[in-house]
Image (tube, grey):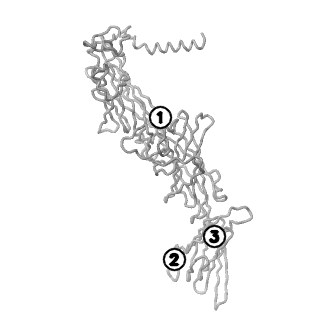
Amino acid sequence: MTVERARLASRLASLAIAAAPSFLAQDGAPRPSQNLGTISCALTAEAPLVHLEGTQERVGELTLACRNLGGEARLNPRGSLIADLSVTLNASVAHGMPIMTVNEGTCPPDASGADDFYPCTTISGTISGPLAASRDPNHPGRVYWRRFAFPIPGAAIPAADGPATPVADCRGLEGMEGGCHPPQTVIRLRNWTVRASDFASGALAGIGRVPIQASVSVSIDGAVHELGQTVVRTATAVPGLAVTAAIPRPERLCGVGEAVAEVTVTEGFAGAFEAARQGSDDSGSSAGAARLMLRMDGVPEAVSVRAPTAAACQTADNRVPLRLGLVDGASEHGVGGVLAPSQLPDLELPAGPDGIVRVLYEVLEADPLRQQECTISLSLAAVAAADAAVGPTIVSVDASMAPQEPQQGQADPEDGSRFSAVARASGVTLNLPGCGTTLLFPFVTNQTTFDTALVIVNTSSDPLGTRHQPGRCRLEFHGTRGGEGVSGTIVRSIPIRAGQQVSYRLSSGNEREGLQALPGFQGYVVAKCTFQYAQGFAFLTEQIGGASVLAQGYLAQILAGR
């Protein structure tokens, strides 16, 4: 036998097995529409992976397959009975209502069925559905269907001109007037969306897979029925992504003035990064696409962050690349905004007053069958004009699914997922080096006959190829003046270009630099400079009768940490 014939024989055998239930009743008990006994139902469910952060995640379909066990004739073969069914989930049912169909019903929800042999909701119908559930006002995860038509498996269907009559052989007569209902009544519950984020309160760190379960209860008027398994898993909630970050060469931020932070986002499961389904809205943002929000906390004022407008990330085994597009102008929750043109250079992202920088990307293309990851290279640059020095600073990094704000009114799940803004203890950090210099002048005085001159030099200009680092120094005076304490008085921020120096005398100040004098001061001075390689020198003199009788100088101490 050839391979093709073997495959054909196997396929025909499978079809014969699948079709067998329609004929088994003819060869053994129970006989269709004659020996109608206990109804036995089996509950099964699909259990896809869904976002643990999701507020309207589509979970699996529930199927209730019921058959007639025969035995003592307990059912009147009139066709259908009245049934009630309720489902309770361990998560809140989100927007919209689940839909029931019976025996693959396709009639519209508003059909009256008056002239149709298959009415949607009448007791004599062969097909029911689609029927929307009702919500239990006392339980966010419970829905129910009341008083729907339940076809008795194998029971007779009334003829057009008379009551239902038992049929000895239903072959070819299933679902027809005067025939029989199918030997199995199949109830399907579809269109489930739940708030999986109910399980994600608090930090996501340490949370693994969380089962979303459904408990089903069914009652059928006038029938003895049994339901074996009543609780099934309808989904498994998993964090949608994980994040790592690193700066391969942090010293470049000081030495060259720029460095690269590599932030890698990885799908929590295949298909977590959902791309656009179809079309786009007026903003240029794709309909139904998920977004990824990177958040950097603690970015110093002296550092600017730039993000690429497009990121293409493809590993060797991915047939479909993961492509991300930068979204500009969105809210802090990742709502709104427009896609930045991919041909533009990196876009600078301002930090908020709290030192938080948010980077938002939309998923343009993704492989739903493979777990993918993407490394996004963010450019960090030292800002020469800033009054504050760069680092040393620890910047925390996190990533989350977006958009995070709920839609107004009854959101359509086809519009795409929504996610909760869950705080995650990711523990991912970037260590920025210290690019400034802090100098300590431990003793200065302008009391009695003494005076002190200070000199600060920017030595970032040298023949060694060091990057010129223009910046500023802020002088803080701690001590007493005329017997009164002076703590943390900031005299002035002094600009000093590379290779230049600025001097300051307590008794006279520096009129050229706009620095006022501090006569009568005695204490110490801290100079905080925003550039590396600052050096300082202090020169104390005593003058009596206009003549210098004592002079002493010392180098400023360079404090660790800046």
Q: Please indicate whether residue 89 sits to the left or right of residue 476 in the image.
A: left
Relative to 232, is 494 on the left or the right? right
Residue bearing mark 2: 486
Give how far apart the Cα atoms at labels 1 and 3 are. 59 Å
Residue at the spot of label 1: 49
Q: Quadrant of residue 157?
A: top left
Q: Picture coordinates of residue 349 (x, y %)?
A: 54, 54
Give 373 or 442, whichever is nearer the viewer. Answer: 373
Which SS class for mark 1?
A: strand
Determine which quarter of the picture holds residue 63.
Answer: top left
Which secondary structure lies at badge 3? Answer: strand
> Which-is-in-front pick, marks 1 and 2?
1
Amino acid of disc 1: Leu
Instruction: Report crowding for label 3: few under 14, some 14 to 19, many 20 or more residues within 10 A (C-alpha).
Output: many
The mark that comes first in sequence, 3 or 2, is 2
Mark 3 vs mark 2, CA separation in Å: 26 Å
Q: Identify residue for label 3.
A: 496
Is the Cβ of the residue at disc 1 closer than 8 Å to that at disc 3? no
Question: What amino acid is labelled 3 in the image?
Answer: Ile
Q: Is residue 186 above or below residue 255?
A: above
Q: Closer to the camera, 458 or 431?
A: 458
